Image (cartoon, helix red, strand yellow):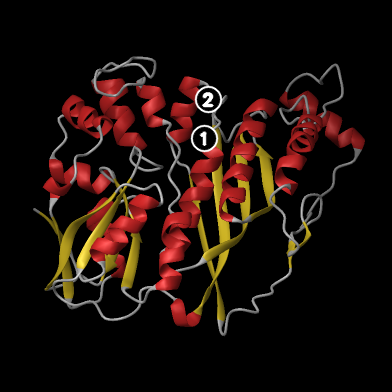
Amino acid sequence: MTWFSPGPQHEKAILRHNGSMPDEPLTYRSAGVNIDEAQRALRSVVGAIQSTYSDQVVAGVGGFGGLFRCEFGEMQKPVLVSSIDGVGTKTKVAAMVGDYSGLGMDIVNHCVNDILCQGARPLFFLDYFGCSRLQGLQFEDVVRGMATACAEVGAALIGGETAEMPGVYVEDEIDVVGSVVGVVDLEKKLPRGKMQPGDAVIGIASNGLHTNGYSLARRSLLEVGGLSVRDEVAGLGVTIGEALLKPHKCYFNAVYPLLQETEGIFAVAHITGGGLYDNIPRVLPSDVRVVIERRSWTPLPIFQLIQQTGNIPDAEMFRAFNMGIGMVLVVDRMLAPALVQRLNEAGESAAVIGEVQSGSNDVQIV
C-alpha cells in the first residue's frame, strides 16, 4: 500500500538533502538490470525449450503461466508428485571453471530422481535462474542443459523465471533452482509392499558429487589443500574442476521400466544431502534397518581426494556425500540378481551392497 506519494519538488528536495542530483535520468539498466538482454537471451533458447513440448503442452514460453493438459487414460488413480531443489554451491565451481553447461542437467536430473522415489514419471519442469547481472551465454548454457535433460525423460520445460538482482547476488555468480511435476498411478506408488529381513539392497553408481557436498569439497580441496580447479590429479584422469562439475546422473530411464514390470521393488532412495545414512531411512518402515557393506564398491577417486586432503572422518564423508552410490533400490532378495543384470544392461553400474534386517529405522555401514 502506498501511504505517501511525493510531488516533483519534494523529490528534488530529497535528492538535494542526500546528495547531488544525477546528471542523467536513472534507468533500470543503469541501476543494474538489463531487460533487453534478458529478452534476447530468452529468444535464443526458445527453440530448445519448445523442443521438449508434447501435445499435452497447451501454452508455454511467453504467458503468465504454463498450461498442461492432464490426460492419463492408462492410469486408474493418477496422483501428481512434485519436487523442488537447487544446484547449490556447485554454481561457484562452475564460475571458477567458466563452464555452466552442466548445471541445467544437474537440476532437472536431481528433481526427476526425487520423484522417481515415489514411482512417478515427470510431466513438466519449471526453473529459476537468479544472478546479479545477467550474462546471456551463462543463461543460454544452463537452459539448453535443462532442455536436453527434459527431452531425455519426456518432460516439458514449460516455464521459468529469470531474476536479475544486483545487491542480492554476488557479482558473476548465479543461482539455479527447479521444480518438477510428475504423475504415478496410486496402485504403483512407492514405497510399496512389505520388506522382509534378508531382502536385498541394490546400489547404482553415481558419477561424482552430483549436487551435494560442495561446500565441504571446496573447503577441503581449494582452501585447506590449496589446490586449483585447473589442477590435474593422479587417479582422476581429469582436472579437479572437471571432476566436480560432472552432471548429476539421471536414473529414470533405467529404473522406471523396472517399476512397471515387477512388484518386487519395494522402495527407491535418491542419495543426496545426508548420504546413505539419512536418505535410506526415508523409505523404510519403522521395524527394519538396512546394513550396507562398504567393501561392496569402491568410492570414486574424487571422494578419496577430498577425504585425504581435508582429513575428513569416514562418518562425515558418508553424511555429506553420496560416496559413489547415487540411488538405492530395496528389492525382493530372489529378484536381486536379475534386477542388477537389467540395470547393468541399461548402462548403469549396479550391485547388491547390503540387506534388510530386523531393527529400528536406520542404516548401518560396516
Which residue is located at x 81 percent, y 31 percent?
36
Image coords of residue 126 (percent x, y): 63, 53
Mark 1, residue position: 102
Work out whether residue 118 can be spotted. no
Residue 290 or 126: which is nearer the viewer? 290
Which residue is located at x 41 percent, y 51 percent?
346
Residue 335 figure quarter: bottom left
Mark 2, residue position: 99
Image coords of residue 252 (percent x, y): 47, 56
Residue 5 or 112: which is nearer the viewer? 112
Residue 35 figure quarter: top right
The N terminus sits in image quarter = bottom right
Q: Which residue lies furthest to the bottom in this view?
A: 76
**Do tag 2 and tag 1 residues touch (Cβ < 8 Å)?**
yes
In the drawing, does residue 105 fall left or right of residue 345? right
Q: In this view, does 290 lie above or below 319?
A: below
In the rendered structure, which amino acid carries the disc numbered 2? Asp
In the rendered structure, which amino acid carries the disc numbered 1? Gly
Q: Which residue lies furthest to the right in this view?
A: 8
In the drawing, does residue 235 fall left or right of residue 80? left
Residue 33 figure quarter: top right
Image coords of residue 193 (percent x, y): 31, 80
Question: Mark 1, residues whose alpha carbon is within 10 Å: few (<14), some, or many (≥20)?
Answer: many
- Tell how many labels: 2
Question: Disc 2 to disc 1, how far (Cα)?
Answer: 8 Å
